[in-house]
Image (spheres, helix red, strand yellow):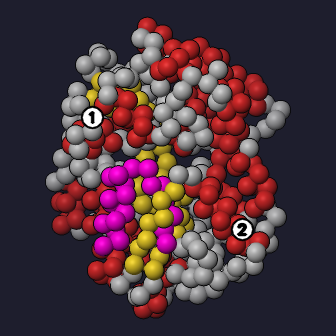
């Protein structure tokens, strides 16, 4: 119930007043940012992601004199709670957090409670090359962004499978269940409330519902049981044939991927279409691993950065956000040898040199092309993730 309690607490926070720096005066932002230290609270569970953030820090220091400190999180809600506590304590200047890697329910909570600096994103110089029409960067789990967070990567659910053990892609949730029943112990997913584990629950629900558009509206007590019944029926059948009979789960996505590397499972969920290729390139996965999607499409979203209302280094945070929208940064994070994250940029808005840099990337043997990725299903409203995750913990979290 952690997220529900957090949202309730945030709803009591009064309106915040936003002041300088003005993102429309970029030269002033650059001048103010020089010499600032930006404490970026971001998930720290992946070595490759941590290395990329360190590279961003090197580059913004080199070009702008901004020092970037990565504060590694296991749960983004911890950063939201910190900002809330500072607000309630009247600490409205120079808070401990300057930037947060955020989306979904955490963003919705902070936006509703006016705990964010901004709007700023659409005034960043590099917003001009963002694909704001073709990418889902102006809504976040159905919530309008309105400039209060800046996108930096696109994600879409895929399934990594080892062709040494699985002959053909499993293209629906019922197909995954049928395969798992025939191969008990060879599939698992991260334990909710881990983000990727909760994403598996949402993806299953989207695929099992005849009309998943009901998930775009907030949860209703009147219909919740009826809407989620197919999910619980599915999980009741799936859980006993999971790895360790569903009595234990990997804690994170990287821990789940290690099970493939160790030959313990043959199938895993990912929110990065390039993750398998990157893991093969890094020696983390065997080169027999490939990627697939579901016939009805899979959930997609953007990763964003947001700036708390009381950041003392908002100018520096905007400089970091703007750099992460640069072609240089986007090419690097799109490279499967680095991260393999999807780009938020509009290729038509880039100059010839930058387009050529993207075209030169070898996306690798396990990365699907945009056409092969198929339909992108909308993220459900944030309230669904909170409610379904809490129910999963109550039903299955004990390992029984």
Residue 389 location in percent, x, y? Answer: 65, 37
From what the image shows, is residue 236 above or below residue 290? Answer: above
Q: Residue at x 66, y 57 (%)?
A: 108
From what the image shows, is residue 295 above or below residue 215? Answer: above
Residue extent of the magenta highlight: 39-58
Q: Describe the element under mark 1 as helix, strand or loop.
A: loop
Instruction: Quadrant for the C terminus, please.
Output: top right
Q: Is residue 121 visible?
A: no
Instruction: Quadrant for the N terminus, please.
Output: top right
Q: Which mark is residue 285?
A: 1
Q: Residue at x 32, y 59 (%)?
A: 51
Q: Residue at x 36, y 34 (%)?
A: 258
Q: Which residue is the site of mark 2?
A: 85
Q: Residue at x 73, y 55 (%)?
A: 6
Residue 69 found in image quarter: bottom left
- Give the CA distance from mark 1 to mark 2: 42 Å
Closest to the observer: 372 or 263? 263
Give the mark nearer the N terminus: 1 vs 2. 2
Give the residue furthest to the top: 182
From what the image shows, is residue 85 above or below residue 210? Answer: below
Residue 360 found in image quarter: bottom left
């Amino acid at each position: 119930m952690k997220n529900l309690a957090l949202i309730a607490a945030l709803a009591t926070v009064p309106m915040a007043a936003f002041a300088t720096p003005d993102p429309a005066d970029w030269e002033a932002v650059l001048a103010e940012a020089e010499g600032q230290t930006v404490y970026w609270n971001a998930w720290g569970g992946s070595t490759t992601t941590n290395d990329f953030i360190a590279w961003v820090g090197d580059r913004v220091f080199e070009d702008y004199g901004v020092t970037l400190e990565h504060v590694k999180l296991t749960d983004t809600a911890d950063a939201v709670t910190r900002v809330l506590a500072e607000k309630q304590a009247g600490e409205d200047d120079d808070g401990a957090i300057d930037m947060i890697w955020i989306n979904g329910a955490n963003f919705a909570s902070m936006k509703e409670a006016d705990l964010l600096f901004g709007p700023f994103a659409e005034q960043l110089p590099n917003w001009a090359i963002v694909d704001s029409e073709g990418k889902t960067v102006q809504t976040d789990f159905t919530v309008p962004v309105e400039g209060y967070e800046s996108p930096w990567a696109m994600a879409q659910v895929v399934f990594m499978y080892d062709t040494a053990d699985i002959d053909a892609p499993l293209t629906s949730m019922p197909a995954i269940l049928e395969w798992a029943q025939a191969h008990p112990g060879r599939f698992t997913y991260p334990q909710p409330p881990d983000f990727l584990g909760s994403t598996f629950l949402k993806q299953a629900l989207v695929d099992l519902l005849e009309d998943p558009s009901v998930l775009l509206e907030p949860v209703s007590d009147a219909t919740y049981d009826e809407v989620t019944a197919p999910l619980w029926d599915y999980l009741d059948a799936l859980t006993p044939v999971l790895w360790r009979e569903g009595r234990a789960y990997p804690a994170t996505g990287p821990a789940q991927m290690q099970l493939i590397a160790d030959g313990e499972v043959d199938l895993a969920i990912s929110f990065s279409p390039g993750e398998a290729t990157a893991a093969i390139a890094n020696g983390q996965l065997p080169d027999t691993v490939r990627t697939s999607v579901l016939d009805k499409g899979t959930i997609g979203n953007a990763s964003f950065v947001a700036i708390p209302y009381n950041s003392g280094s908002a100018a520096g945070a905007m400089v970091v956000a703007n750099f992460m929208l640069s072609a240089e940064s986007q090419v690097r994070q799109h490279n499967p040898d680095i991260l393999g994250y999807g780009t938020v940029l509009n290729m038509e808005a880039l100059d010839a040199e930058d387009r050529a840099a993207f075209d030169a990337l070898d996306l690798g043997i396990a990365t699907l092309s945009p056409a092969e990725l198929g339909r992108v299903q909308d993220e459900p409203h944030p309230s669904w993730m909170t409610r379904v995750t809490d129910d999963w913990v109550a039903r299955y979290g004990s390992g029984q």
